[in-house]
Image (cartoon, rainbow, N blue to C red):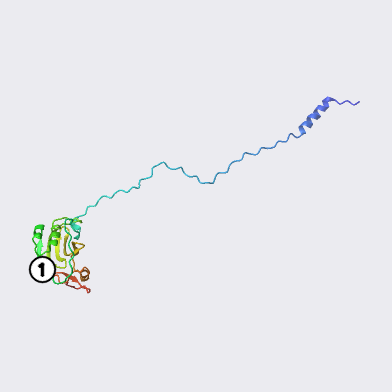
Amino acid sequence: MRTVTLAAVLPVLALVAACSPGPEVTPTPPASVAAPSSAPVEPAPSSAAAPSTSAVPAPSETVDPSTVEPSGELAPTGSLSPVPQPTPQGGPWTTVGETYSDAAAVAGASLLPESFRAFLGQRLGVEDEAGCTMTEVEVKTVHRDGFVFGSEAGTCGSAQTVWGITEGAWHYIVAFQDVMPCRDLELNGIPTGAEGLRCMDDSGAAKDY
């Protein structure tokens, strides 16, 4: 019977154990990492108050009355009675040739229509809507169709003037310093033949109207 020595077998078992493969190990996959978001990031609303857009009133301007042309605006005439519109009759103008500087002088002007005397009485020495004050008025001639031709002077300058009745009251029809076109006088229905009233014809020449 063959005998195996234990001392010889142990080295052989140790060598076999060293060469045997170990248990299979499955690698753990790395944790997934989220991709960066491509959506835009909106800024948080600002807590600062928005600037006020309310309008700031501009400072008032002061106008030098000496630089203003005669306005042709009426002084307050609320107390004047309505003036009937005359029926056009034509005919000549009536020469007056008087100058007035206050309401008392106008009140005694017998050649002027009563309604026109009342109108001038509220104009002389009274500041109008444009800040101008009439200080003197010359009446050269009047017409029964409801027209007066003359001139006025005041704090804003002087001008030749034709007054007339429109809309139940006396108003400026034309007020001018330089000769104006005759056509403008015709369009306003002003009767011809007023002494001293000159105008410019279609050729540019000055003539009596």
Q: Is residue 102 visible?
A: no
Instruction: Work out whether 176 lies above or below 33.
Output: below
Query: How many other residues sit within 10 Å of disc 1, few (<14), some (14-19) or many (≥20)?
Result: some
The answer to whether residue 42 is left or right of residue 159 is: right
User: From this viewpoint, which residue is outermost toward the bottom?
Assistant: 203
> Which quadrant of the figure has residue 117?
bottom left
Give the residue displayed 79% in from the left and 32% down from the top.
16
User: The C terminus appears in which quarter of the rendering?
Assistant: bottom left
Q: Amino acid at mark 1?
A: Thr
Identify the element where label 1 is drawn: strand
Q: How many marks?
A: 1
Give the residue displayed 83% in from the left and 25% down from the top.
6
Image spot of residue 167 (x, y percent): 21, 62
The foreground one among 3 and 142 is 142
> Which quadrant of the figure has residue 28?
top right
For label 1, the residue is 95
Image spot of residue 183 (x, y percent): 22, 71
The foreground one among 10 and 150 is 150
The foreground one among 187 and 201 is 187
Q: Is residue 16 visible?
A: yes
User: From this viewpoint, which residue is outermost toward the right?
Assistant: 1
Image spot of residue 190 (x, y percent): 18, 69
Give the residue displayed 9% in from the left and 58% down from the top.
104
Give the residue displayed 14% in from the left and 64% down from the top.
151
User: The N terminus appears in which quarter of the rendering?
Assistant: top right
